[in-house]
Amino acid sequence: MKYGILAAGEGSRLVHEGIAVPKPLVTLKGEAMIDRLIRIFHENNADEIVIITNNLTPLVQQHIRELQLHDNQIQLVVHTTPSSMHSFYELYPYLGTGKFCLTTVDTVFREAEFKDYIQAFGETEVDGLMAVTDYVDDEKPLYVATDEDLRITGFYDAPQSDIHYISGGIYCLTNRSFTTLERCVREGVSRMRNFQRELINDGLRLQAYRFSKILDVDHVDDIKKAEDFLQ
Protein backbone atom coordinates (compact mmCIF):
# COMPACT_ATOMS: atom_id res chain seq x y z
CA MET A 1 0.00 0.00 0.00
CA LYS A 2 1.08 3.57 -0.62
CA TYR A 3 1.07 6.18 2.13
CA GLY A 4 0.95 9.95 2.01
CA ILE A 5 1.99 12.46 4.67
CA LEU A 6 0.62 16.02 4.65
CA ALA A 7 3.42 18.13 6.12
CA ALA A 8 2.97 21.40 4.22
CA GLY A 9 1.38 23.42 7.03
CA GLU A 10 3.17 26.30 8.68
CA GLY A 11 2.82 25.13 12.28
CA SER A 12 2.42 28.79 13.23
CA ARG A 13 0.89 28.16 16.65
CA LEU A 14 3.91 26.14 17.78
CA VAL A 15 6.25 28.82 16.46
CA HIS A 16 4.39 31.55 18.32
CA GLU A 17 4.65 29.47 21.51
CA GLY A 18 8.43 29.22 21.24
CA ILE A 19 9.10 25.94 19.39
CA ALA A 20 12.16 26.56 17.21
CA VAL A 21 11.89 23.59 14.83
CA PRO A 22 9.18 23.03 12.19
CA LYS A 23 6.27 20.88 13.33
CA PRO A 24 7.30 17.69 11.43
CA LEU A 25 10.61 17.71 13.33
CA VAL A 26 9.08 18.12 16.78
CA THR A 27 10.08 15.04 18.77
CA LEU A 28 7.86 12.75 20.82
CA LYS A 29 9.84 10.53 23.17
CA GLY A 30 12.99 11.33 21.18
CA GLU A 31 11.53 10.59 17.72
CA ALA A 32 10.55 13.28 15.21
CA MET A 33 6.86 13.08 14.34
CA ILE A 34 7.57 12.61 10.66
CA ASP A 35 10.11 9.87 11.41
CA ARG A 36 7.57 8.11 13.60
CA LEU A 37 5.02 8.03 10.79
CA ILE A 38 7.57 6.79 8.28
CA ARG A 39 8.64 4.00 10.63
CA ILE A 40 5.05 2.95 11.32
CA PHE A 41 4.19 2.98 7.62
CA HIS A 42 7.17 0.78 6.84
CA GLU A 43 6.03 -1.62 9.56
CA ASN A 44 2.66 -1.76 7.77
CA ASN A 45 3.95 -2.81 4.36
CA ALA A 46 4.52 0.54 2.69
CA ASP A 47 5.31 0.25 -1.00
CA GLU A 48 5.98 3.97 -1.16
CA ILE A 49 5.71 6.96 1.18
CA VAL A 50 5.00 10.32 -0.47
CA ILE A 51 5.54 13.43 1.65
CA ILE A 52 4.55 17.00 0.82
CA THR A 53 6.19 19.92 2.58
CA ASN A 54 6.15 23.62 1.78
CA ASN A 55 8.75 25.99 0.41
CA LEU A 56 9.08 27.74 3.77
CA THR A 57 10.59 24.83 5.71
CA PRO A 58 14.05 24.04 4.28
CA LEU A 59 14.95 22.12 7.45
CA VAL A 60 12.17 19.64 6.78
CA GLN A 61 13.21 19.31 3.14
CA GLN A 62 16.81 18.69 4.18
CA HIS A 63 15.73 16.10 6.74
CA ILE A 64 13.65 14.17 4.23
CA ARG A 65 16.35 14.30 1.56
CA GLU A 66 18.80 12.83 4.07
CA LEU A 67 16.32 10.04 4.76
CA GLN A 68 16.04 9.40 1.03
CA LEU A 69 19.75 8.58 0.87
CA HIS A 70 19.00 5.39 2.80
CA ASP A 71 15.34 4.85 1.92
CA ASN A 72 14.34 4.67 -1.74
CA GLN A 73 10.67 4.28 -0.86
CA ILE A 74 10.36 7.93 0.21
CA GLN A 75 9.22 10.52 -2.33
CA LEU A 76 9.27 14.25 -1.61
CA VAL A 77 6.99 16.91 -3.08
CA VAL A 78 7.75 20.55 -2.23
CA HIS A 79 4.82 22.88 -2.77
CA THR A 80 3.23 25.61 -0.67
CA THR A 81 -0.52 25.05 -0.63
CA PRO A 82 -3.50 26.92 0.86
CA SER A 83 -5.03 23.90 2.60
CA SER A 84 -4.50 20.23 3.41
CA MET A 85 -6.94 19.34 0.61
CA HIS A 86 -4.72 21.14 -1.87
CA SER A 87 -1.70 19.32 -0.43
CA PHE A 88 -3.55 16.06 -1.10
CA TYR A 89 -4.15 17.27 -4.66
CA GLU A 90 -0.40 17.73 -5.16
CA LEU A 91 0.25 14.22 -3.83
CA TYR A 92 -2.44 12.23 -5.58
CA PRO A 93 -0.56 11.65 -8.89
CA TYR A 94 1.96 9.67 -6.84
CA LEU A 95 -0.59 7.52 -5.00
CA GLY A 96 -1.32 5.08 -7.80
CA THR A 97 -4.50 3.34 -8.83
CA GLY A 98 -5.35 1.28 -5.77
CA LYS A 99 -5.78 1.81 -2.06
CA PHE A 100 -3.72 4.29 -0.07
CA CYS A 101 -3.53 5.85 3.39
CA LEU A 102 -3.16 9.58 3.94
CA THR A 103 -2.48 11.35 7.23
CA THR A 104 -1.44 14.71 8.60
CA VAL A 105 2.05 14.84 10.06
CA ASP A 106 0.95 15.65 13.62
CA THR A 107 -1.48 12.77 14.06
CA VAL A 108 -0.62 10.66 17.11
CA PHE A 109 -2.22 7.25 17.60
CA ARG A 110 -1.54 3.84 19.08
CA GLU A 111 0.51 1.72 16.70
CA ALA A 112 -1.40 -1.50 17.41
CA GLU A 113 -4.69 0.20 16.56
CA PHE A 114 -3.22 1.57 13.35
CA LYS A 115 -2.04 -1.90 12.32
CA ASP A 116 -5.57 -3.27 12.81
CA TYR A 117 -6.97 -0.31 10.88
CA ILE A 118 -4.74 -0.93 7.87
CA GLN A 119 -5.56 -4.62 7.92
CA ALA A 120 -9.27 -3.83 8.04
CA PHE A 121 -8.95 -1.49 5.07
CA GLY A 122 -7.19 -4.17 3.08
CA GLU A 123 -10.09 -6.53 3.68
CA THR A 124 -12.96 -4.13 2.99
CA GLU A 125 -14.60 -3.12 -0.29
CA VAL A 126 -15.67 0.39 0.78
CA ASP A 127 -14.32 3.49 -0.96
CA GLY A 128 -12.96 4.94 2.24
CA LEU A 129 -12.24 3.83 5.79
CA MET A 130 -11.94 6.95 7.91
CA ALA A 131 -10.33 7.00 11.35
CA VAL A 132 -12.61 8.40 14.05
CA THR A 133 -12.45 8.73 17.81
CA ASP A 134 -14.79 9.73 20.60
CA TYR A 135 -11.91 11.55 22.34
CA VAL A 136 -12.37 15.27 21.66
CA ASP A 137 -9.41 17.57 22.34
CA ASP A 138 -9.37 19.75 19.24
CA GLU A 139 -10.08 23.43 18.72
CA LYS A 140 -12.21 22.85 15.62
CA PRO A 141 -13.15 19.16 15.47
CA LEU A 142 -14.97 17.68 12.51
CA TYR A 143 -17.92 15.67 13.79
CA VAL A 144 -18.65 12.44 11.94
CA ALA A 145 -22.22 11.11 11.75
CA THR A 146 -22.68 7.37 11.26
CA ASP A 147 -25.47 4.83 11.12
CA GLU A 148 -25.57 1.78 13.39
CA ASP A 149 -23.17 -0.06 11.06
CA LEU A 150 -20.66 2.83 11.21
CA ARG A 151 -21.43 3.85 7.64
CA ILE A 152 -20.65 7.57 7.46
CA THR A 153 -23.68 9.71 6.67
CA GLY A 154 -22.29 13.21 7.10
CA PHE A 155 -19.62 15.57 8.40
CA TYR A 156 -20.46 18.53 10.66
CA ASP A 157 -18.58 21.50 12.07
CA ALA A 158 -20.76 21.64 15.19
CA PRO A 159 -21.68 18.86 17.64
CA GLN A 160 -25.00 17.10 17.18
CA SER A 161 -26.94 15.20 19.82
CA ASP A 162 -26.68 11.88 17.97
CA ILE A 163 -23.03 12.14 16.87
CA HIS A 164 -20.42 10.31 18.94
CA TYR A 165 -17.23 10.65 16.87
CA ILE A 166 -14.87 13.20 15.40
CA SER A 167 -12.43 12.77 12.53
CA GLY A 168 -8.98 11.54 13.50
CA GLY A 169 -7.12 12.97 10.52
CA ILE A 170 -6.26 9.57 9.01
CA TYR A 171 -7.86 8.70 5.70
CA CYS A 172 -7.74 5.35 3.94
CA LEU A 173 -9.17 5.85 0.45
CA THR A 174 -9.22 4.36 -3.02
CA ASN A 175 -8.49 6.08 -6.30
CA ARG A 176 -12.24 6.62 -6.75
CA SER A 177 -11.74 9.67 -4.51
CA PHE A 178 -9.57 11.39 -7.14
CA THR A 179 -12.54 12.39 -9.30
CA THR A 180 -14.09 14.22 -6.36
CA LEU A 181 -10.74 15.78 -5.46
CA GLU A 182 -10.20 17.12 -8.97
CA ARG A 183 -13.71 18.60 -9.04
CA CYS A 184 -13.21 20.24 -5.64
CA VAL A 185 -10.04 21.97 -6.79
CA ARG A 186 -11.63 22.95 -10.08
CA GLU A 187 -14.65 24.47 -8.33
CA GLY A 188 -12.64 26.33 -5.69
CA VAL A 189 -13.53 24.11 -2.75
CA SER A 190 -10.99 24.20 0.09
CA ARG A 191 -10.23 22.21 3.27
CA MET A 192 -10.23 18.46 3.80
CA ARG A 193 -13.52 18.55 5.68
CA ASN A 194 -15.30 20.01 2.66
CA PHE A 195 -13.68 17.43 0.40
CA GLN A 196 -14.99 14.69 2.69
CA ARG A 197 -18.49 16.16 2.46
CA GLU A 198 -18.22 16.04 -1.31
CA LEU A 199 -17.23 12.37 -1.18
CA ILE A 200 -20.57 11.70 0.48
CA ASN A 201 -22.38 13.91 -2.05
CA ASP A 202 -20.75 11.97 -4.89
CA GLY A 203 -22.06 8.69 -3.50
CA LEU A 204 -18.80 7.14 -2.30
CA ARG A 205 -19.14 4.53 0.44
CA LEU A 206 -17.32 5.75 3.53
CA GLN A 207 -17.01 3.70 6.69
CA ALA A 208 -15.84 4.87 10.11
CA TYR A 209 -13.14 2.97 11.98
CA ARG A 210 -12.93 3.69 15.69
CA PHE A 211 -9.64 4.46 17.42
CA SER A 212 -9.67 4.73 21.21
CA LYS A 213 -7.78 8.02 21.05
CA ILE A 214 -6.09 10.21 18.44
CA LEU A 215 -4.22 13.41 19.26
CA ASP A 216 -3.06 16.37 17.16
CA VAL A 217 -0.01 18.39 18.10
CA ASP A 218 -0.95 22.03 17.56
CA HIS A 219 0.29 23.65 20.78
CA VAL A 220 3.23 23.24 23.14
CA ASP A 221 1.13 21.53 25.79
CA ASP A 222 0.00 19.00 23.18
CA ILE A 223 3.56 17.65 23.06
CA LYS A 224 3.40 16.57 26.71
CA LYS A 225 -0.08 15.13 26.20
CA ALA A 226 1.14 13.12 23.22
CA GLU A 227 4.19 11.80 25.06
CA ASP A 228 2.09 10.79 28.05
CA PHE A 229 -0.36 9.07 25.69
CA LEU A 230 2.43 7.10 24.03
CA GLN A 231 4.08 6.17 27.33
Image (cartoon, rainbow, N blue to C red):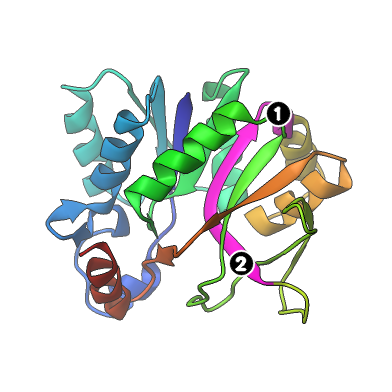
Q: Residue 77's mark?
A: none
What amino acid does circle 1 point to?
A: Glu
Q: x and y percent of residue 111 in the render?
A: 33, 48
Residue 167 shown in magenta: yes
Q: In which quadrant is the C terminus drawn?
A: bottom left
Tell me which label, 1 or 2, sits earlier in the chain: 1
Q: How crowded is mark 2: few (under 14 residues within 10 Å), some or many (20 or more)?
A: many
Residue depicted at 72% across the width and 34% down the height: 126
Residue mark closest to the camera, 1 vs 2:
1
Q: x and y percent of residue 17 in the render?
A: 28, 80
Viewed as shown, does residue 192 lie left or right of 219? right
Residue 231 versus residue 115 in the image, above or below: below
Q: Residue furthest left?
A: 30
Residue depicted at 26% across the width and 37% down the height: 39
Q: In which quarter of the image is residue 43?
A: top left
Which residue is the site of mark 1? 125
Residue depicted at 12% across the width and 56% down the height: 30
What amino acid does circle 2 point to?
A: Ile
Q: x and y percent of residue 86 in the render?
A: 60, 45
Which residue is the site of mark 2? 166
Marks 1 and 2 sit apart, C-alpha to C-alpha, by 23 Å
Residue 182 shown in magenta: no
Give, as a single range, the part of the protein colored magenta: 164-178
Residue 44 versus residue 163 in the image, above or below: above
Which secondary structure, mark 1? loop
In front of the other: 204 or 53: 204
Q: In which quarter of the image is residue 202?
A: top right
Q: How crowded is mark 1: few (under 14 residues within 10 Å), some or many (20 or more)?
A: few
Viewed as shown, does residue 214 lie left or right of 92? left
Viewed as shown, does residue 188 lie left or right of 87? right
Q: x and y percent of residue 122 in the render?
A: 56, 28
Residue 191 visible in the snapshot: no
